[in-house]
Image: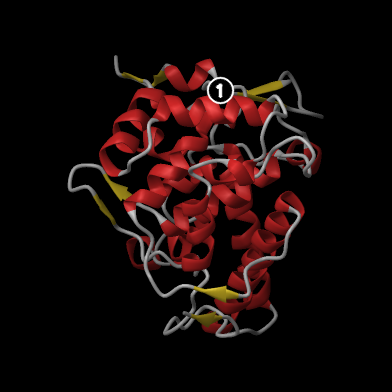
């Protein structure tokens, strides 16, 4: 069920929001959420990652042999408004480049570069440190995915809508309104800090036209404790301390795997769509 998996894509962003650092916004959710989709596409039945682990926008341009790129690619990219908005921005960038005469290959390369710039800007602003200078050849692991899931504490269940008729709030777990393209004011709104728990919307995700109700907190707990040495309760307790200003994200026990993920995802060695500027170790 894609709605359950889609919320995983927000988790990377949660790592970087803490008191004393740059504020965390809906735009950040979209950028890092799409990054997560470009790295992980989890087959829960076979328990394997179907993505190539690199930030080449394969989640948009290669899903179903490229037949859905103009829709944002993989349907999970359109399961929440923040990620969908960023995906459509990149689709529009690619389309504009093609209209200017670029070949499909060059247009995708340039669009990937725009995406990388979004990721770098977020990383350096939020963490207040330079983006890694070298990448890693290794592919992402289940340990790193488990660490990412630990940050779902900060996922916003609802965000504010502005300048819209008859709507002032959006529930981000609803698939019925997931393809809402957010405006700049909505993307810029700040979100609350960590509090050591999931928003209630994620504990009761209703699948439309069925009786199925999913609890993301429990789904994450099972994944985390199966594929890593971390315990979800300990992770959430640490995040609560971050939100209270008692510790920083740099002190979290499960932050290092996420840092490695950035380096792995940026390795462009042998990839036709990524820059070769970063050395892969």
Any part of residue 1 in sight: no
Look at the image and tell me in which quarter the N terminus lies: top left
Q: Relative to residue 250, is residue 59 drawn left or right?
A: left
* Vertical position of residue 65 compared to residue 97: above or below: above
Q: Relative to residue 246, is residue 253 drawn left or right?
A: left
Question: Can you tell which quarter of the image residue 106 is in?
Answer: bottom right
Determine the residue located farthest toward the left in the rendered image. Answer: 46
Any part of residue 10 in sight: yes
Question: Can you tell which quarter of the image residue 190 is in?
Answer: top right
* Vertical position of residue 187 compared to residue 243: above or below: below
* Vertical position of residue 70 compared to residue 167: above or below: below
Query: Observer-nearest residue: 213 or 143?
Result: 143
* Vertical position of residue 212 compared to residue 138: above or below: above
To which residue does mark 1 refer? 196
How would you rate the neighbour count of disc 1 (Cα within 10 Å): few for under 14, some for 14-19, many for 20 or more?
A: many
Query: Observer-nearest residue: 133 or 10?
Result: 133
Identified at 67% across, 66% down, the residue is: 131
Identified at 25% across, 42% down, the residue is: 44
Query: Observer-nearest residue: 143 or 205?
Result: 143
Identified at 71% across, 30% down, the residue is: 191
Identified at 73% across, 18% down, the residue is: 166
């Amino acid at each position: 069920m894609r709605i359950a998996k889609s919320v995983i894509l927000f988790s990377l962003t949660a790592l970087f929001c803490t008191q004393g650092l740059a504020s965390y916004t809906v735009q950040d959710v979209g950028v890092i959420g799409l990054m997560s989709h470009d790295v992980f596409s989890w087959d829960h039945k076979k328990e394997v990652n179907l993505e190539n682990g690199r930030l080449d926008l394969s989640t948009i341009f290669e899903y179903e042999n490229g037949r859905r790129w103009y829709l944002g690619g993989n349907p999970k990219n359109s399961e929440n408004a923040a990620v969908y908005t960023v995906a459509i921005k990149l689709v529009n960038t690619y389309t504009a480049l093609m209209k200017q005469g670029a070949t499909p290959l060059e247009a995708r390369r340039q669009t990937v570069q725009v995406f990388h710039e979004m990721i770098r800007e977020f990383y350096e602003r939020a963490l207040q440190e330079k983006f890694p200078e070298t990448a890693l050849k290794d592919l992402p692991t289940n340990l790193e995915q488990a660490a990412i899931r630990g940050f779902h504490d900060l996922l916003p269940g609802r965000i504010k809508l502005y300048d819209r008729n008859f709507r002032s709030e959006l529930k981000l777990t609803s698939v019925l309104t997931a393809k809402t393209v957010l405006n700049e004011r909505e993307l810029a709104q700040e979100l609350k800090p960590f509090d050591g728990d999931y928003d209630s919307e994620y504990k009761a995700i209703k699948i439309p036209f069925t009786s199925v109700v999913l609890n993301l907190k429990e789904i994450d707990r099972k994944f985390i404790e199966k594929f890593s040495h971390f315990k979800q309760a300990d992770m959430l307790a640490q995040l609560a301390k971050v939100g209270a200003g008692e510790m920083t994200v740099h002190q979290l026990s499960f932050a290092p795997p996420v840092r490695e993920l950035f380096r792995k995802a940026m390795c462009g060695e042998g990839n036709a769509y990524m820059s070769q500027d970063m050395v892969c170790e």
